[in-house]
C-alpha cells in the first residue's frame, strides 16, 4: 500500500494547527482546550505520516534497521498517548484543573518533564534522524533507477513535510506575535 500525498494534501495536514491558532484568539477559556487539541492533532498527523514514509523506506530498501524502527515508533506511541491525554483532561473533563484568574498555574511535575522529553525526542527524530537516515541510505545506492524511485517516493515527501512544518510554524509564531502586539497598541 502506498500513501503518496500531493502538496495540497500535505497542506491539509496542517489545517487543524492553523484552525487552532485562529480559535486561540477568541475567548481564552473557551478556546484554549480546542486550540491545544488541534495543535497536538496536527503534530500527531505529521509524525504519523513521516513515520509511515520512513518505515516503508526501511522495509523496501532492504536495510531493516531496528534502531530506525524503534526510534520511529517512540514518537508515534507518545503522540498517540499525548493526544488521548489532551482529549481526556482538556475536553472530556475540562474543569478538573481550572484556576480562577487570567493565567493558569504552571505545574512542572514529573509528567510535564516526561512530556517535554518526549517532545524533544520527537523533534530530533522528525527533523534529523529520519531525514538523515533516508538521505544517507539513498546516497549509498548504486542503481540509478532505484535511487531515483526512492528519492521521489520517500526523500522528496519527507523534505517537503519538514519545509512546510518550518514555514507554517514560523509563520504562525510571527502571526501570533503581530496579533499580540496589535492588541497592545
Image (cartoon, grey):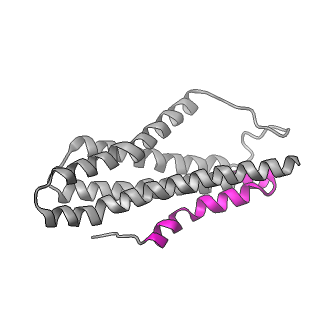
The front one of 160 and 44 is 160
Q: Within the image, what quadrant is residue 104 found in?
A: top right
Q: Position of residue 113 (x, y in %)?
A: 54, 30
Counting the numbered discs, the total is 0
Magenta residue check for 38: no
User: Which residue occupies the extreme right position in the image?
Assistant: 185
Q: Main secondary structure of the magenta part?
A: helix
Q: Quadrant of the N terminus?
A: bottom left
Q: Is residue 179 left or right of residue 58?
A: right
Residue at left offset 45%, top offset 42%: 123
Q: Position of residue 95 (x, y in %)?
A: 75, 46
Residue 45 vertical position relative to residue 105 in the rendered view, above or below: below
Q: Is residue 174 left or right of residue 184?
A: left
Residue at left offset 34%, top offset 58%: 52
Q: Position of residue 64 (x, y in %)?
A: 18, 49
The front one of 135 and 75 is 135
The front one of 9 and 88 is 9
Residue 40 visible? The answer is yes
Residue 159 vertical position relative to residue 108 in the rendered view, above or below: below
Please give the range of residues in magenta.
7-32
Q: Within the image, what quadrant is residue 62 found in?
A: bottom left
Magenta residue check for 20: yes
Residue 91 visible? The answer is no
The front one of 146 and 40 is 146
Amino acid at each position: 500500500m502506498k500513501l503518496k500525498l500531493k502538496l495540497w494534501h500535505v497542506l491539509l495536514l496542517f489545517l487543524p494547527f492553523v484552525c487552532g491558532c485562529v480559535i486561540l484568539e477568541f475567548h481564552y477559556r473557551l478556546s484554549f482546550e480546542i486550540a491545544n487539541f488541534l495543535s497536538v492533532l496536527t503534530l500527531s498527523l505529521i509524525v504519523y505520516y513521516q513515520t509511515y514514509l520512513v518505515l516503508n523506506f526501511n522495509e523496501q530498501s532492504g536495510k531493516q534497521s531496528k534502531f530506525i524502527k524503534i526510534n520511529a515508533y517512540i514518537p508515534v506511541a507518545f503522540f498517540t498517548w499525548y493526544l488521548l491525554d489532551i482529549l481526556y483532561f482538556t475536553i472530556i473533563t475540562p474543569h478538573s484543573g481550572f484556576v480562577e484568574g487570567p493565567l493558569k498555574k504552571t505545574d512542572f511535575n514529573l509528567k510535564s518533564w516526561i512530556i517535554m522529553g518526549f517532545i524533544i525526542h520527537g523533534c530530533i527524530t522528525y527533523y534529523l534522524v529520519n531525514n538523515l537516515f533516508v538521505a544517507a541510505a539513498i546516497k549509498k545506492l548504486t542503481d540509478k533507477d532505484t535511487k531515483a524511485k526512492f528519492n521521489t517516493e520517500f526523500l522528496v515527501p519527507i523534505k517537503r513535510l519538514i519545509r512546510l512544518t518550518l514555514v507554517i510554524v514560523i509563520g504562525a509564531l510571527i502571526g501570533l506575535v503581530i496579533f499580540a502586539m496589535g492588541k497592545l497598541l
